[in-house]
Image: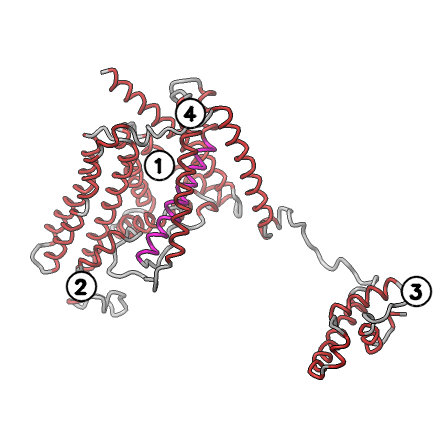
Amino acid sequence: MAALESPENHIKATATSTATTSSSTTSDLNFSVRRRSTTVTDSPSTEMMESEDLKSNGKECDKVTNENRSDIKFNYRPSMPAHRGVRESPLSSDAIFKQSHAGLFNLCIVVLVAINSRLIIENIIKYGWLINGGFWFSSKSLRDWPLFMCCLSLPAFPFAAYLVEKLAYQNYLPQLVVVFLHTIITTGSLLYPVLVILRCDSAFLSGVTLMLFSCIVWLKLVSYAHTNSDLRAIAKSIDREDVPSISPYVGNPYDTYFKSLVYFMVAPTLCYQSSYPRTESVRKGWVVQQFVKLIIFTGFMGFIIEQYINPIVKNSQHPFKGNLLYAIERVLKLSVPNLYVWLCMFYCFFHLWLNILAELLCFGDREFYKDWWNARTVEEYWRMWNMPVHKWMVRHIYFPCLRNKIPKGLAILIAFLVSAVFHELCIAVPCHVFKLWAFIGIMLQVPLVVITKFLQNKFRSSMVGNMIFWLFFSILGQPMCVLLYYHDLMNRKGKTESR
């Protein structure tokens, strides 16, 4: 029997199997064992016999063959148990989140691409090419030069803040005067663009771009002034020897450098510090790849807006003035393309653009977002969605409130209030519509924070809060705001043209 053959005889039989034909009466088991051994010692037999250098390899093959022989003899016998423990099915409720679902994820992507490609082709065949840039770049776009000039003049505010800090560093200005001047500078950096946009009937995209720039400048200037004020206080405490020796600021004295401010104003961060983690070089090929992705996804985002979102909102009614069921149907119909645009916006700005900017400036800390899509509460989402703003809020609002004995819940409410104000400014000012829809939408996140946190504590290891976040924030909230602002904007334009 082949199962009782010695290893030496078996190897000899294997070595000569390529030159002679094995007997047809050999059993199936003998054939399977010979095939398994052949895979280990599979080399031309004549070369093994003629070359002395392969003798050591032959000994190693003997060891491997003996081990495989042992495995066949003991581990693969019919009497060996096939079931040796308690195991769950991969898709059971207890084990589903412990398994890797990369294959299913790839399947979902393939199906999603196939379905949406069919829908895009069907939409173009049915409605034609609906791309029209009038909403973004109208005939009035050439008259948007005041907004462009306003954007070019924004660097004057950081320069003024630098002069104030330089005078404060040289002890020419008292602390109260420094605070007063910084308040005027930061307020002017925000009100100046608002007034320019309101006085000019500009295109929507131009107004949004200018408001985003002005809000970023305001946040950076606040961080610059607040950080330098804290460094001045620490420097005075060091002079009085009031700071413990373990303080991280000892050995890093307060100073002002214009170069540091310039780098901070263009760096992808909102929190000022004298130095940042830096990378060694710029990967030029990688930057080109990211730029190509940025162009592709920006074009796709514009296509979704023009081909899907604009026709839906044009054929809709005001959500609060028409039939309730019709309004719900419009919101749900708008939710999918709006979600695509929102995800593309996140990918283009937070991943592609900020990483491109960081690479060009050798900025090392590139944690611009975390895995917010896995957030189980609304509070987790706001902590992970926009890391530059989150770090700014924690550094300049949340912890200063706690240090001033303000309760934690009220500090969170103040942070949401500031966020709501800036969301309203970035949308309402370019639209010339002040109905506070964005402000209300952000402030309604506060009760959702409480609800999702309660559900998370009640149903631990549950994704109920994540589902509530996706439902209220992406499926209902954003499409509702789009409809509200669109109809209010169209009503304002109608009244303006009737005059």
Quadrant in the rendering for residue 31: bottom right
Quick check: marks 1 and 3 in contact, CB under 8 Å? no
Q: Is residue 177 magenta?
A: no
Report the disc number at residue 25: 3
- Compare marks 1 and 3 and give the one earlier in the sequence: 3
Three-letter amino acid code of the residue under disc 2: Ala
Q: Which residue is mark 4?
A: 311
- Compare marks 2 and 3 and give the one earlier in the sequence: 3
Quick check: marks 2 and 3 in contact, CB under 8 Å? no
- Provide residue 451's location: percent of width, then percent of height: 44, 39
Q: Residue at x 35, y 56 (%)?
A: 359
Report the disc number at residue 442: 1
Q: Is residue 352 magenta?
A: yes
Q: Does residue 140 appear to the left or right of 353 in the view shown?
A: left
Q: Residue at x 81, y 67 (%)?
A: 33
Report the disc number at residue 235: 2
Type of secondary structure dominating the magenta stretch: helix
In front of the other: 67 or 134: 134
User: From the viewer's perspective, is residue 134 above or below residue 93?
Assistant: above
Three-letter amino acid code of the residue under disc 4: Pro
User: From the viewer's perspective, is residue 280 above or below residue 486?
Assistant: below
Regarding mark 4 in the picture, which secondary structure is present there? helix
Mark 2 vs mark 4, foreground winner is 4
In front of the other: 335 or 447: 335
